């Protein structure tokens, strides 16, 4: 992932903060005292001259999805909710949960248990990186930010068209909520349902009802999976999303000839000269 970021976005690895978060697995699914951990990569805002924006979680989610589509594995795309936090490196939140900085070399050559052992002691401050502004990265981020703003404006205008005569669930989404799917596809279906129901103005409880119905139908019941669903619901509430017909799952469950949403989008894209 570090190599991908460096090659794709031109961000040198010395500007990437690597944080190890680990804790004992005390969930109901695991009573054997096993250790669970995640590696978090942070790009400090100074690198891309970033300013605080509520769009940052959705931009991060978009970039992580791009990485998955390009073949990177073990990337969590459902963690970008606004109330999430990353423990301060060299901190210990309790006797079983620790967080520590790592260098790229340590990440490459140390195994999980060795890193977990390393996290038990504070690291020296000289391991902390000193990021620098990279002008090319700033230009790239500005393009991404403008693209997202245009996307939101288009979405707002389409929302007015859709809600003008009263909201209704898209036929593809209605079918999707009752579909039998493999687990990976079911999670993606949950993302679509959360985003579109939120786009139509549904309350969080209504979104949760449909998500949990689909989850139970497709045997998504574990503790870790429940936390993932919780993040999906929160992200959908925070980022209402009109997913259009080109999405593979939307087209898979699309009725023959399309539906009202297709017509509305066509009307928006190519408005009639005379009404």
Image (cartoon, helix red, strand yellow):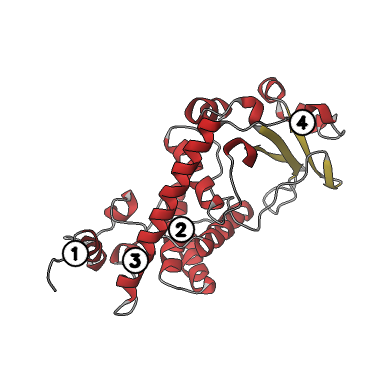
Mark 2–mark 3 CB contact (< 8 Å):
no
Task: Tell me the quarter of the image containing the C terminus.
Answer: bottom left
Specify which label sits upstream in the sequence, 3 or 4. 4
* Residue at the disc numbered 1: 271
Q: How many marks?
A: 4
Q: Position of residue 173 (x, y in %)?
A: 35, 63
Specify which label sits upstream in the sequence, 2 or 4. 4
* Residue at the disc numbered 4: 128
Distance from disc 3 to disc 4, alpha carbons, whole Å, reads 45 Å
**Front-lying residue, 125 or 214:** 125
Callout 2: helix, strand or loop? helix
Quadrant in which residue 222 is drawn: bottom right
Residue 190 has which mark? Answer: 2
Residue furthest toward the left?
274
Residue 157 has which mark? Answer: 3
**Front-lying residue, 190 or 16:** 16
Residue in the picture at 78% in, 33% down? 116
Distance from disc 2 to disc 4, alpha carbons, whole Å, reads 38 Å
Mark 1–mark 3 CB contact (< 8 Å):
no
Distance from disc 1 to disc 3, alpha carbons, whole Å, reads 13 Å
**Front-lying residue, 161 or 252:** 161
Specify which label sits upstream in the sequence, 1 or 3. 3
Callout 4: helix, strand or loop? loop
Q: Position of residue 20 (x, y in %)?
A: 72, 36
Look at discs 1 and 2 and give the one toward the viewer: 1
Residue in the picture at 80% in, 41% down? 98
Specify which label sits upstream in the sequence, 2 or 3. 3
| Relative to 210, 56 lies left or right | right
Specify which label sits upstream in the sequence, 4 or 1. 4
State whether residue 134 is above or below residue 52. above
């Amino acid at each position: 992932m570090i190599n991908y970021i460096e090659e794709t976005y031109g961000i040198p690895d010395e500007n990437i903060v690597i944080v190890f978060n680990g804790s004992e697995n005390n969930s109901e699914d695991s009573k054997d005292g096993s250790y669970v951990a995640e590696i978090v990569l942070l790009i400090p805002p100074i690198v891309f001259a970033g300013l605080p924006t509520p769009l940052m979680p959705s931009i991060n989610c978009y970039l992580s999805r791009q990485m998955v589509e390009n073949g990177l594995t073990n990337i969590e795309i459902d963690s970008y909710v606004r109330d999430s936090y990353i423990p301060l490196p060299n901190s210990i939140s309790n006797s079983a949960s620790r967080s520590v900085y790592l260098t790229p070399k340590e990440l490459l050559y140390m195994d999980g248990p060795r890193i977990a052992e390393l996290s038990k002691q504070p690291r020296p401050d000289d391991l902390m990186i000193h990021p620098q502004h990279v002008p090319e990265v700033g230009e790239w981020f500005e393009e991404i930010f403008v693209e997202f703003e245009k996307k939101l404006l288009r979405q707002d205008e389409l929302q007015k068209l859709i809600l003008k005569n009263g909201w209704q669930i898209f036929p593809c989404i209605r079918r999707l909520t009752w579909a039998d799917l493999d687990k990976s596809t079911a999670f993606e279906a949950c993302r679509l349902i959360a985003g579109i129901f939120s786009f139509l103005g549904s309350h969080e409880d209504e979104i949760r009802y449909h998500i949990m119905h689909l989850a139970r139908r497709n045997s998504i019941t574990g503790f870790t999976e429940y936390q993932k669903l919780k993040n999906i619901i929160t992200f959908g509430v925070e980022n209402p999303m009109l997913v259009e017909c080109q999405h593979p799952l939307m087209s898979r469950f699309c009725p023959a000839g399309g539906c009202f949403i297709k017509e509305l989008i066509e009307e928006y894209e190519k408005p009639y000269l005379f009404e």
